[in-house]
Image (cartoon, rainbow, N blue to C red):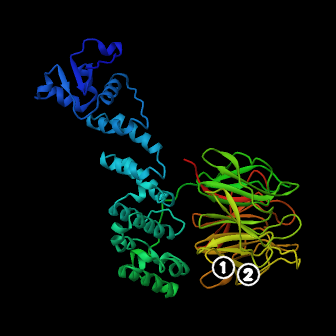
Amino acid sequence: METPPLPPAQNLLCDVTIVAEDMEIPAHRVVLAACSPYFHAMFTGEMSESRAKRVRIKEVDGWTLRMLIDYVYTAEIQVTEENVQVLLPAAGLLQLQDVKKTCCEFLESQLHPVNCLGIRAFADMHACTDLLNKANTYAEQHFADVVLSEEFLNLGIEQVCSLISSDKLTISSEEKVFEAVIAWVNHDKDVRQEFMARLMEHVRLPLLPREYLVQRVEEEALVKNSSACKDYLIEAMKYHLLPTEQRILMKSVRTRLRTPMNLPKLMVVVGGQAPKAIRSVECYDFKEERWHQVAELPSRRCRAGMVYMAGLVFAVGGFNGSLRVRTVDSYDPVKDQWTSVANMRDRRSTLGAAVLNGLLYAVGGFDGSTGLSSVEAYNIKSNEWFHVAPMNTRRSSVGVGVVGGLLYAVGGYDGASRQCLSTVECYNATTNEWTYTAEMSTRRSGAGVGVLNNLLYAVGGHDGPLVRKSVEVYDPTANTWRQVADMNMCRRNAGVCAVNGLLYVVGGDDGSCNLASVEYYNPTTDKWTVVSSCMSTGRSYAGVTVIDKPL
């Protein structure tokens, strides 16, 4: 038997020895009973242990029991990745609630897309209700990353149905749910394909774009082989054929919008002209309604493309005050740190940047001598850029946005006709083709472009010397543009982003000076409101995006 050395106070006047495996731990009944209801019941009841000099605990290993008895005497315990899975159930058995709570808090701090489902199952097994709820919420809020994990692919059918049926999934599109279902079934196809109908009951197909239903869902072999799945597809097609006002009459769990718990958001404003290219980066906290500075860019940058992808902010190309650049920097909000990634193939400033199907697209721009029609895409996994089909028109000062799985390039300046553009074209990644869509009602170069509720907004911009405050919105299903309320100020070269059902327009210039103000559009009221708190610096040509606030 092993009897480890005890703290001096713990070694005096001991009246019981607790034994687990080959470990013997001298202790005091009164101390153990005072701290642990388990020992209190053992030593004050009629059981034989109440009088025994040696008490064996079979359910806990020796070292874990030793740690917990030490805790009783010292009120100190070290929870680690290595010991938490044995410590928590042992603390539960001995009814040491503070230790159990510390273990749960440790596991909560370790939540990550690759482990949250495992932590959820562990919490469920050991009746840790708070941790169970937090792990479940985490999985819902990070669904797009969680479904890429081994843990998701190894879930049982009931757990998958429970997760994908949740109204609280935070997803950019219902496509993520459909693709997750297909990936889960294909992971063990022979056994799992019989569950397709049960799974598809929880995929909200009517919320998917028509093009995706026809090109992807209908062509999926697992859907073709199930008559019930085909019924769900027909339901979705019917939904799309109905006029908008009649759709609400189609009562089904699959036509109900998901209502995720919004993670706290930050708006990040990167670089810009003030009046020269700057390195400053500031964030706006929507909840606290205030601005704060974060890590500066590694070098001065304005007129860059800006996106948020895979938890990182990418600043793409732009102008450093003397040269148009092809460099790309990425910002990690958790580490508050910038690092360089692979350069683009071409130098580009005043480009458009957007994320489509997990790739970062850099669209058009100006290379220092000519407007560009070329387009390239970045694969974050291989850290490589590659060209895709060029646009039909050269476009510098172009705005871009993604709606319904298509990438739209809006307005800009072509350099050849020396005129600002009202034309719009869209890119289909499946066919690698650009096609023209309906034109805007007015020419706009340097317009801010944003997407809200599956509609594409073109905000401000200019036509020659005329800087606009007008705003128009494009509905892809109808292929039409319509005017909405004007902004409070004329703005061109402003940043645009959508958050919490509102469209924010940040900075820009009015033709004579750079603006520090921000205003937002509410589509429900068709009104623009100026945010009370301004940026510290007036800036145009800044990159703007919205990120999840680091926890």
- Which part of the image, by quadrant, shows the N terminus? top left
Nearer the N terminus, badge 1 or badge 2? Answer: 2
Q: Is residue 520 above or below residue 411?
A: above
Write the residue at 75% across / 76% down: 391
* Left or right placement of residue 499 versus residue 156 in this view: right
Up/down of 339 relative to 258, above or below: above
Which is nearer the eye, 43 or 68? 68
Which residue reaches farthest front?
A: 190
Q: Position of residue 99 (x, y in %)?
A: 36, 34
Residue 464, which numbered label? none
Q: Determine which of the numbered discs, if any, sits on residue 474 in the image.
A: 1
Q: Which residue is mark 2?
A: 440
Residue 470, picture quadrant: bottom right
| Element carrying mark 1 | strand
Alpha-carbon neighbours of circle 1 within 10 Å: few (<14), some, or many (≥20)?
Answer: many
Instruction: Note whether residue 293 is visible.
Output: no
Residue 300 in percent (x, y) is at: 81, 51
Number of numbered discs overlaid on the protein picture: 2
Q: Quadrant of residue 335?
A: top right
Mark 1 belongs to which amino acid?
Tyr
Q: Amino acid at mark 2?
A: Met
